[in-house]
Amino acid sequence: MATKTKVTMDALTYAERFNAVVGGMASFDETSDGSKLEPKMDIIVGSIVPSTRRGIAAYNGMSYNASLAREKAYRKSGVNLSELPKGKRGKSINVDAINEALAESVVASSM
């Protein structure tokens, strides 16, 4: 009877693939699998991998949590993984537009 063996990616391959995604030089290939992510990620072989943790997980055929745990462990061990670009946090506000509207409301109320 044949037994299933779990094939895992070695540390060097994961680090190389991680850095390729962050550098914008990776496209989805046959090892990519978005079905392990929630919500599932549609993958088109040959398309550029987005520089996000979800993109990296799909590119490496891992779940998001497994990819994140591996990334944290490698960084803690001293592996030189590229820094992911930071996204905007919170709501962005247009200060100039708000100040103009306040000035107009003050002028309108004083008339």
Image (cartoon, helix red, strand yellow):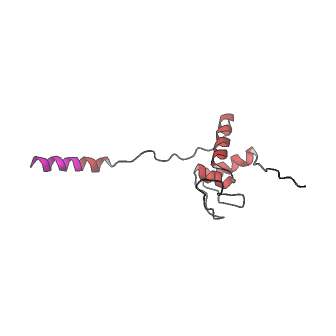
- Percent position of residue 20, x then y: 65, 52
Q: Residue furthest right?
A: 1
Residue for point 82% across, 50% down: 5
Residue at coordinates 31% horizontally, 46% vertically from top-left?
Answer: 95
Residue placed farthest to the front in the image? Answer: 1
Q: Position of residue 64 (x, y in %)?
A: 63, 48
60 with respect to 90 (left or right): right
Residue 94 image point, x, y percent:
33, 49
* Helix, strand or loop: magenta stretch: helix
Residue 53 image position (x, y, % from top left): 60, 49
Report the front residue among 55 and 23: 55
Residue 71 sits in quarter? top right
Indicate whether 45 appears above or below 64: below
Q: Residue at x 16, y 46 (%)?
A: 106
Residue at x 40% of width, y 47% of height: 91
Counting labels gives 0
Inspect the magenta stretch and tell me whether residue 101 lies in it.
Answer: yes
Q: Nearer the viewer, residue 62 or 38?
A: 38
Magenta stretch? 100-111
Determine whether, in the image, residue 19 is placed left or right of residue 104. right
Indicate the quadrant containing the N terminus: top left, top right, bottom left or bottom right.
Answer: bottom right
Residue 22 belongs to the span the image colors magenta = no
